[in-house]
Image: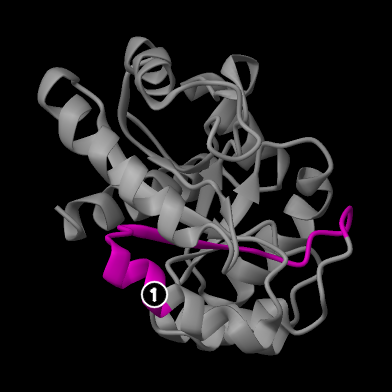
Amino acid sequence: MMIDLHTHCFFSDGELVPAEHLRRVEVLGYEAIAITDHADSSNIDFLIPRIAKAAKDLNIHSRTRLLVGVELTHVPPELIAELATKSRKLGAEVIVVHGETVVEPVKGGTNLAALLCDEVDVLAHPGFITREEMEIAAEKGILIELSGRKGHSLTNGYVAKLALECGAKLIVNADAHGPADFLTADMAKIVALGAGLNEKQYQEIQANMAKFVTAIS
């Protein structure tokens, strides 16, 4: 069963309303999916309650569970802890931080601030994350993303190798913004194997995601 903890709907820069978003992945056999629209202090209290309302309405009628999420995006490192805490109070089940991808001008220190925050669940596309940062992720159990998205995926091999050396937990996310972006089971596996993982390590990725979803049930 597929799980994805990082996707976007039309509340930020995605294409679909939550109902269609959920139905598309239900057909693909997903167990759960998080909508984690881009947020900062200007819209966080708009996004999360609306995704929560959609989840409450839709989960009764869907085999796939919609998780309430948010992606703190280009937020100054100094504000990450404050906004992550607010996100949790607003009902976010999955808190993602937009990491220091090599294809966007994310402010230095974002990865570290995210990893030091107890409320952050996932560090997305962390680019050239340092060994010290990866060791913090391993110690705290924060999930480190291998991205299926063009551009963000450029450092997947580097991220995977360092995570394995440090014992950090890896996951695969699509960072989907529309129907063409959702990963099939075969494509998710390709993302992992293409980053240098073996079959057993890919199974561990699936277990990491399943354990996370079970823990927030």
Q: Position of residue 195 (x, y in %)?
A: 71, 46
The residue under label 1 is which amino acid type? Lys
| Residue bounds of the magenta highlight | 85-104
Q: Is residue 100 left or right of residue 212?
A: right
Q: Residue furthest left?
A: 60
Q: Residue at x 40, y 26 (%)?
A: 18
Measured along the vertical axis of the image, is residue 6 above or below residue 44?
A: above
Color style of the picture = one colour
Q: Position of residue 144 (x, y in %)?
A: 56, 63
Q: Residue at x 28, y 47 (%)?
A: 210
For the N terminus, the quadrant is top left
Q: Is residue 205 left or right of residue 78?
A: left
Q: Can residue 170 be seen at all in this image of the molecule?
A: no
Counting every numbered tag in the picture gives: 1
Question: Splitting the image into 4 quarters, where does residue 30 fall?
Answer: top left
Residue at mark 1: 86
Label 1 sits on a secondary structure element that is helix
Q: Residue at x 71, y 79 (%)?
A: 76
Within 10 Å of disc 1 (Cα), the crowding (few <14, some 14-19, many 20+) is some
Q: Position of residue 200 (x, y in %)?
A: 45, 46
Measured along the vertical axis of the image, is residue 52 above or below residue 59?
A: below
Q: Residue at x 82, y 80 (%)?
A: 108
Q: Position of residue 148 (x, y in %)?
A: 66, 37
Does 155 lie within the magenta span?
Answer: no
Does 101 lie within the magenta span?
Answer: yes
Q: Residue furthest top?
A: 27
Q: Can residue 135 be seen at all in this image of the molecule?
A: yes
Depth check: 94 or 156 in front? 94
Question: Splitting the image into 4 quarters, where does residue 130 fall?
Answer: bottom right
Depth check: 112 or 72 in front? 72
